[in-house]
């Protein structure tokens, strides 16, 4: 298939608006307004959108090696999205639709991992990324950059960009030296109407400023990521002055106005609703990043009072957003008279045979890869209860991290310090079976591309760290019934922002308010010395401020590497040959109420 590389230099999309416009052929504009008494000219079109696809092409879970399913019986993948897209195009007319995405495309499944690391797209004569192939075949018109686009480094992202037949947009992804856009900020598409005047639809792409923290190793000194509101305020007026009749923003940013990185950056992580409120001239925002489902959310712009329509389709291709726009020709221009949004559920659609044929070979390669046996386990381990119990499967992650950091520090200035480790329950369905252990089993413990670091913290700082982590539990009085399904995720804290720390022994009193829950905190049988120093083996997301845990982001880094932790786990299992929980598992923490264990 012919591939077309797009480059973008400077602060405009090319030399003049015409070069930035793609789509239907130009038609001469109307020479005069509709006459007195005539019905006004009207035109309707739709913009479809996905977000947070995270490497999902097929309705398949590579970590379990079977068809994807969840409690709500959702389906995932671009093959099903393609069917929905074709249904909308058939209903609306292909020439009356656009297709966009709000980011986080090339990370998340073993399919996407395989073509970044095992058979990388960056190799000489390397393959075309499956996500590029699928999105090209579906006919995307633009995609915003997500923060996870940067996980594999800028060269992989640039190669993916080159392989896409549509632009990757990032108006607030700037070259660190020139402060000019490092990616195309926007695209303007022309839609032909029956009335002799095209509709110009501008799509502005905005990504997440948290990239500067979460992928610091890949972007530091190369790119900077200012706030969404700031850059939208710069670009939206330009798009209007260039003749855009409709402005749609694809924002890899949730709608809630919150941040997980606290005060480390002067920008809000989930700023989509703030963009709608603060920047006039926007008609709709395709929201991403937060992995929530928002069929339609209306926000009034503070300056104009005009409502902006927001929609966020559920992650992994579980939903397709459809924005519907009704325009009227008034005073020599098209005006949005009405706009709305809805989501379509991909579990109502079969997989598109076109996408299945296109990528079945890639799928088979990855299935074979994840089923490679790398060792055996003497016992079955599961994360089913790891969110509220100290389970051996989380101890396994910590054992790997401690061994890795100790080996790295051996013989150096910090070799004498005790090594502790943090780990989270990333998935409540991960399993290490008894008997043969495969790549998919080990990788399923760590679905994120995090790498490992070592930071020095004091006993007092670790106590603060644990108190912050324990906010995850809902305060539950002694004697009250305990339902594990309702015990966790207090204040919407996700599972990946609850850390268990190995090497210390402690209780978490969930009857007490957050901030005063860590009791009986000891190290090697003695109360933890607040002044003592420890090395904490910690993932780069946490070390760079992800989750806004105290102290760790400013703590001294004494070691780091670029190998993903899940690959370190795979290598550890291969080296050991046999995984024996008796060698590393212990109950170091438990939930209590007034000293009485909850479980």
Image (cartoon, grey):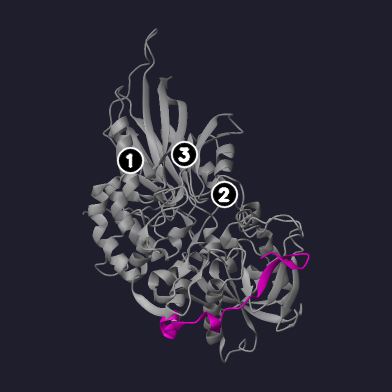
Numbered disc 3: secondary structure: helix
Q: Is residue 406 above or below residue 467?
A: below
Residue at label 1? 85
Across and down, in percent, residue 69 comes to 41, 53
Q: Cα distance, mark 3 to mark 2? A: 24 Å
Q: Is residue 73 above or below residue 459?
A: above
Judge from the rendering whether residue 57 lies leftward or rightward of residue 253; answer left or right.
Answer: left
Residue at label 3? 238
Judge from the rendering whether residue 529 lies leftward or rightward of residue 234; answer left or right.
Answer: right
Across and down, in percent, residue 537 comes to 58, 76
Q: Is residue 208 above or below residue 412?
A: above
Question: Disc 3 or disc 1, which is closer to the eye?
Answer: 1
Numbered disc 1: secondary structure: helix
Q: Is residue 176 visible?
A: no
* Range shown magenta: 573-599
Residue positioned most to the left: 1
Across and down, in percent, residue 125 comes to 24, 67
Residue at label 2? 270
> Which residue is painted at 61% across and 61% down in the image?
547
Q: Is residue 50 above or below residue 510?
A: above
Magenta span includes 22: no
């Amino acid at each position: 298939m012919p591939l077309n590389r797009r480059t973008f230099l400077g602060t405009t999309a090319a030399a003049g608006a015409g070069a930035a416009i793609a789509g239907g052929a130009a038609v001469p504009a109307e020479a005069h307004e509709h006459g007195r008494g005539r019905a006004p000219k009207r035109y309707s079109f739709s913009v479809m959108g996905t977000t947070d696809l995270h490497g999902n092409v097929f309705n398949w879970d590579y970590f379990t090696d079977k068809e994807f399913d969840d409690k709500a019986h959702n389906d995932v993948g671009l093959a099903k999205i393609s069917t929905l897209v074709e249904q909308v195009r058939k209903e609306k007319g292909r020439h009356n639709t656009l297709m966009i995405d709000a980011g986080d495309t090339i990370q998340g499944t073993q399919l996407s991992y395989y073509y970044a690391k095992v058979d990388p797209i960056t190799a000489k004569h390397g393959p075309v990324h499956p996500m590029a192939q699928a999105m090209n075949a579906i006919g995307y018109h633009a995609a915003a950059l997500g923060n996870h686009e940067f996980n594999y480094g800028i060269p992989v992202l640039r190669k993916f960009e080159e392989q896409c037949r549509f632009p990757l947009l990032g108006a607030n992804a700037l070259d660190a030296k020139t402060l000019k856009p490092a990616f195309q900020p926007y695209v303007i598409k022309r839609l032909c109407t029956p009335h002799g005047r095209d509709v110009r639809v501008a799509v502005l792409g905005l990504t997440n400023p948290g990239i500067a923290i979460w992928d610091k190793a890949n972007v530091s000194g190369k790119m900077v990521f200012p706030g969404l509101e700031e850059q939208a305020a710069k670009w939206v007026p330009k798009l209007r002055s260039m003749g855009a009749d409709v402005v749609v923003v694809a924002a890899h940013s949730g709608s809630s106005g919150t941040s997980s990185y606290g005060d480390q950056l002067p920008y809000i992580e989930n700023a989509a609703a703030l963009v709608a409120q603060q920047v006039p001239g926007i008609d709709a925002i395709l929201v991403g990043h937060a992995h929530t489902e928002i069929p339609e959310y209306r926000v009034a712009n503070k300056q104009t009072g005009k409502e902006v329509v927001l929609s966020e389709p559920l992650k992994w291709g579980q939903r397709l957003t459809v924005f519907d726009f009704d325009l009227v020709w008034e005073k020599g221009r098209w005006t949005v008279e009405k706009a709305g949004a809805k989501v379509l559920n991909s579990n109502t659609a079969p997989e598109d045979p076109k996408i299945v044929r296109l990528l079945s070979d890639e799928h088979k390669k990855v299935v074979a890869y994840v089923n490679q046996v790398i060792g055996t386990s003497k016992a079955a381990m599961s994360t089913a209860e790891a969110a509220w119990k100290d389970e051996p499967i989380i101890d396994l992650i910590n054992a790997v991290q401690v061994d890795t950091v100790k080996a790295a520090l051996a013989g150096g200035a910090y070799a004498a310090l005790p090594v502790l480790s943090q780990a989270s329950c990333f998935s409540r369905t991960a399993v290490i079976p008894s008997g043969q252990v495969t790549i998919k089993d080990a990788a399923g413990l760590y679905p994120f591309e995090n790498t490992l670091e070592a930071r020095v913290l004091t006993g007092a700082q670790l106590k603060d760290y644990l108190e912050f982590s324990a906010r995850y539990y809902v305060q539950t009085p002694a004697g009250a019934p305990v339902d594990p399904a309702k015990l966790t995720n207090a204040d919407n804290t996700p599972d990946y922002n609850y850390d268990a720390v190995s090497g210390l022994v402690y209780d978490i009193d969930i009857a007490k308010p957050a901030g005063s829950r860590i009791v009986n905190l000891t190290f090697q049988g003695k109360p933890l010395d607040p002044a003592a120093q420890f090395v904490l083996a910690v993932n780069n997301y946490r070390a760079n401020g992800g989750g806004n845990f105290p102290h760790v982001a400013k703590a001294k880094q004494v070691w780091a590497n670029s190998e993903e932790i899940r690959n370190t786990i795979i290598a550890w299992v291969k080296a050991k040959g046999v995984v024996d929980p008796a060698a590393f598992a212990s109950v170091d923490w438990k939930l209590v109420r007034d000293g009485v264990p909850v479980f």
